[in-house]
Amino acid sequence: MSIDARLLSGVTVLATVVEQGSFTRAAALLGLSPSGVSRAISRLETRMAVRLIARSTRALRLTAEGSRLYELAAPHLAAIEEAATAASRDAAEVAGLLRASVAVAFSRQILTAKLPEFAQRFPALELHISQHSDAGDLNADGLDVAVRFGDQPSSSMISRRLLETRVLTVASPRYLAAHGRPSHPSDLAGHNCLQFLDPQNGRPFEWEFQRAGETISVSTAGNLTLSDAGTLVGACVAGSGIAQVLALSVGDELRSGLLVDLFPDWPGETFPLYIIRPSRRFTPLKVEKFVDFCLEIAQTAQ
């Protein structure tokens, strides 16, 4: 069997450009310069005598011939990668650099205590943990994987649910002493309610309460709007107002009495936590192992 290596290389570059959406991102993934990617596409177009990508200063798009080539070639490229992965997986070492963006609450309450175990399992792996916006793009941010709260919008990402955490309505004893304790969610209309921005749409989250099949929405208002969960908790502890927070993020404050759960009889509202990764044809072993580890420790934490 004879394989034209240059043709295969060119088609691989084209597929990477399509999946990454730009020459620059494709170049970073392939270890080439953007001009090197452009030249590879030009050589492929010359070889095939057709224009594959219509370039402009604002964007790039596939021509009809380019779309047809990608549609037909992509499954075969995936099969080649899968075959290579299957042949080497058993002997592979989990090594290299893994860049992960992890929600602060999950990092502090669950992941941090398990990091020594992760390092012991995979001593050749270097793990970089950061916090990015829950609405950020993994490829643009140079990330391999992310742990994010909230339902994930449809995209080229692959997501798996790690856990569900309760949504609590809390206040500090200082605030309650000054303003009284609401006895029902509808009483919140008379209180200063701290607003928290949804990173997916930039608008404050709506306040909802659920129990035994009953669901009510409550319109709230306040003099402070925040986008950082840690600042929200800190402001609430300081007595700035009432807040809706995730149970996972305020366990210590509840146990110590710094915050009070105002409506324990409305326990039904929950918020999901997902781990997501780019839907590349080939998922590096280091990413698979980190995803598996997070799924494992999330299950034991519930």
Image: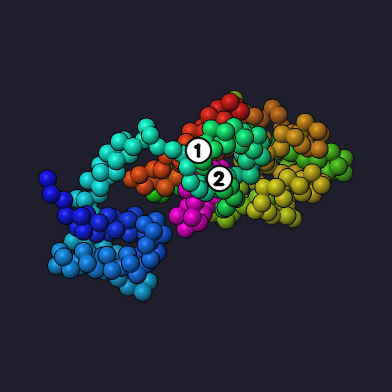
Amino acid on which disc 2 is placed: Leu
Q: Which residues are magenta?
A: 134-150
Question: Is 61 on the left-hand or right-hand side of 29?
Answer: left
Q: Residue at x 75, y 35 (%)?
A: 252
Is residue 223 magenta-colored? Answer: no
From this viewpoint, is residue 189 visible?
no
Residue 23 spot, x, y in % from top left? 36, 64
Is most of the magenta stretch helix, strand or loop?
loop
Q: Nearer the viewer, mark 2 or mark 1?
A: 2
Q: Residue furthest bottom?
A: 57
Residue 1 spot, x, y in % from top left? 12, 45
Seen in the picture, residue 94 relative to 265 is either above or below; the reply is: below
Which residue lies under the disc numbered 2?
Answer: 127
Q: Residue at x 71, y 29 (%)?
A: 264
Q: How is the image coloured?
A: rainbow
Which residue lies under the disc numbered 1?
Answer: 290
Mark 2 vs 1: CB contact within 8 A: yes
Residue 163 image-quadrant placement:
top right
Q: Quadrant location of the C terminus? A: top right
Residue 39 image-quadrant placement:
bottom left
Seen in the picture, residue 27 relative to 163 is either above or below; the reply is: below
Q: Residue at x 36, y 74 (%)?
A: 57
Question: Is 268 on the left-hand or right-hand side of 265?
Answer: left
Question: In this view of the protein, which residue sits in the foreground, 207 or 41?
Answer: 41
Question: In this view of the protein, which residue sits in the foreground, 30 or 76?
Answer: 30
